[in-house]
Image (cartoon, helix red, strand yellow):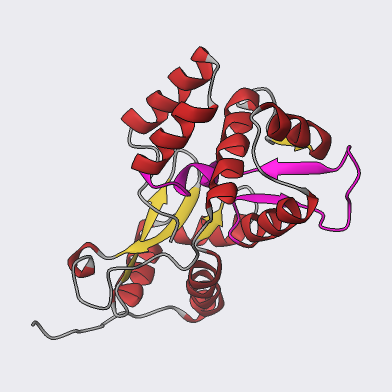
Amino acid sequence: MSDIKLNISIKGENNILFKRCVRKLLDSTFIVGDKDTKLYAFISRESNRQDVSDYLRMIGFDVLVDSNIRIAMLKSHEADEEAVGLKRANVVTFNTDQYNLLLVLWEMYLENLGYNDDNVVMLGDLVDKIQVYEVNMDSNKLLAAMKIFKKYDLIDYDLKDKSEDALITLYPSLQFGWNIAQFKTVSAEYMKNEQIEDDLEAAIDSDAIEEDVE
């Protein structure tokens, strides 16, 4: 096994941003440009991304920055993917109902893509979609799932607003929450609309969807 060496130098004015980026990734997996503008601007610069990546590799992680959708994501360092004790990189596991809800949210994200700068839906519309696709999700399960999705920056919304008009912001990080095999299995069961299926397959074929949420 090779030695681990770390040799990075962070300028004084960047110290706080560097620390915040590392902590944000370890805590929430994602840095979303539309939400954390300063953090994304910092980590999206190549030199800063490399410093953060070098630091994270010390503990078996790496960072992926996608400039097209303006997201930075914590991921397993490829050299450690098969290492005993380090194989499991994700810090959260979704149950079946939560995965089904994730699919509904991703389908709504695709439906609204390109219409406005922010991809926003109303809680009432989400509940209607849940009923259409017969997802086993009562109000308590929905609230619990939404809290988890909010924590991991897949969505954003006001936890106190439970009205039908409550706004839910959908982030492109939604597409990284799926295991591809599971995504195809569940989407085949719930996605009846042919156009939606085409959009989902296109996303998968373009490698837009990663293996697991970190």
Q: Residue at the spot x=27%, y=78% of the render?
A: 85
Q: Nearer the viewer, residue 16 or 205?
A: 205
Give coordinates of residue 14: x percent, y percent. 50, 74
The residue positioned 48% from the left and 49% from the top of the image is: 177
Where is residue 103 shown, x and y percent of the image? 55, 38
Extent of the magenta region: 152-180
Task: Indicate left or right for 96 with 181 as reference.
Answer: right
Q: Position of residue 167 (x, y in %)?
A: 81, 41
Q: Residue furthest left?
A: 1
Q: Quadrant of the C terminus?
A: bottom left
Quadrant including the N terminus: bottom left
Q: Is residue 156 magenta?
A: yes
- Left or right relative to 87: residue 23: right
Quadrant in the picture for residue 81: bottom left
Q: Residue at x 65, y 53 (%)?
A: 35
The front one of 89 and 64 is 89
Q: Quadrant of residue 132?
A: top right
Q: Is residue 77 above or below residue 133?
A: below
Residue at the image position 88 percent from the left and 58 percent from the top: 160
